[in-house]
Amino acid sequence: NRNIEDVRELKEKVKYGPIRSKYKIFIIDEVHMLTGASFNALLKTLEEPPSYVVFIFATTSPEKVPLTILGRCQKYDFKRLTIDEIISRITFIAGKEKIIIDEESLFFIAKKGDGSMRDAQGLFDMAAAFCDNEITYDKLKVFFNLAESDVYFNITDYIKDKNAENVLKYFDDIVGRGYDLQTFLDGLTDHYRNLLIAVSTNSSDMILESESIKQKYKENI
């Protein structure tokens, strides 16, 4: 609802007070997507809102919201959840729902959630349905068509040995097995970052991976 017609409809709703509650709350998600005309139409209402109205604007790009709007708002920044926080919550849900899940799967889902509990829980729901409430990493690899972590270690070994032929054969094999190349390249980028951290700090403590994968990086220091 980003067009000026939508904002005009919203302004009509603002005129009427709440029936049972003290406040009438309007939440606009991804508010930066509103057009310039929409922001201008909303500005007057923000300047002199009725006492019973509360607007909540949510956005992932606050820098795209006009200063005239930002200047009339209280700003609250929400931090991304850590992997440990997501793992703790998914573990709690799994226990309540009597779903079995191994450590590798927990870590993968938490990392894939990318700081969002909602996204992580969505992945967890899909994984539980696919794995029939017994989630193992081997099943998840099939479901998400994931490359083994050993693939990345093997490729870096070939690169260290300057074995271009084997690198190209490996990529050809990966394409043949149907891996999504963008996902694979993102994983390879993370792998090199992890190697850099391990070599620079002489430790794997700062690497965001499960303990078994961290051990592999320790062995490559």
Image (spheres, rainbow, N blue to C red):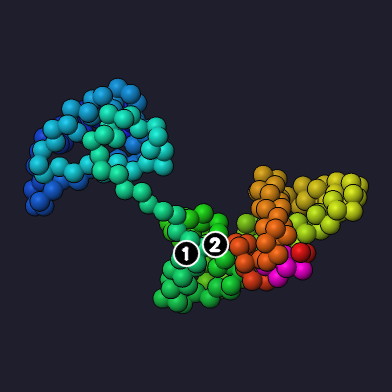
Specify the principal SS of the magenta part.
Answer: helix
Which element carries disc 1, helix, strand or loop? helix
Q: Is 215 colored magenta in this rendering?
A: yes
- In the rendered structure, the answer to whether residue 122 lies left or right of residue 101 reads left
- In the rendered structure, the answer to whether residue 6 lies left or right of residue 123 reads left
> What residue is drawn where x is 9% and y is 42%?
51
Q: Is residue 124 visible?
A: no
Give the magenta-colored segment's residue range: 213-219
Q: Quadrant of the C terminus?
A: bottom right
Q: Characterize the local packing of mark 2: few (<14), some (14-19) or many (20 or more) Cα atoms within 10 angstroms.
A: many
> What residue is drawn where x is 25% and y is 43%?
74
Q: Position of residue 207 (x, y in %)?
A: 62, 62
Q: Which residue carries the number 1 mark? A: 86
Q: Position of residue 121 (x, y in %)?
A: 46, 61
Q: Earlier in the sequence, mark 2 or mark 1?
A: 1
> What residue is drawn where x is 11% and y is 44%?
52
What residue type is disc 2 on?
A: Ile
Which element carries disc 2, helix, strand or loop? helix
Q: Position of residue 124 (x, y in %)?
A: 50, 63
Q: Nearer the viewer, residue 110 or 82?
A: 82
Q: Characterize the local packing of mark 1: few (<14), some (14-19) or many (20 or more) Cα atoms within 10 angstroms.
A: many
Label ID, residue 109? 2
What residue type is disc 1 on?
A: Ile
- In the rendered structure, the answer to whether residue 155 lies left or right of residue 190 reads right
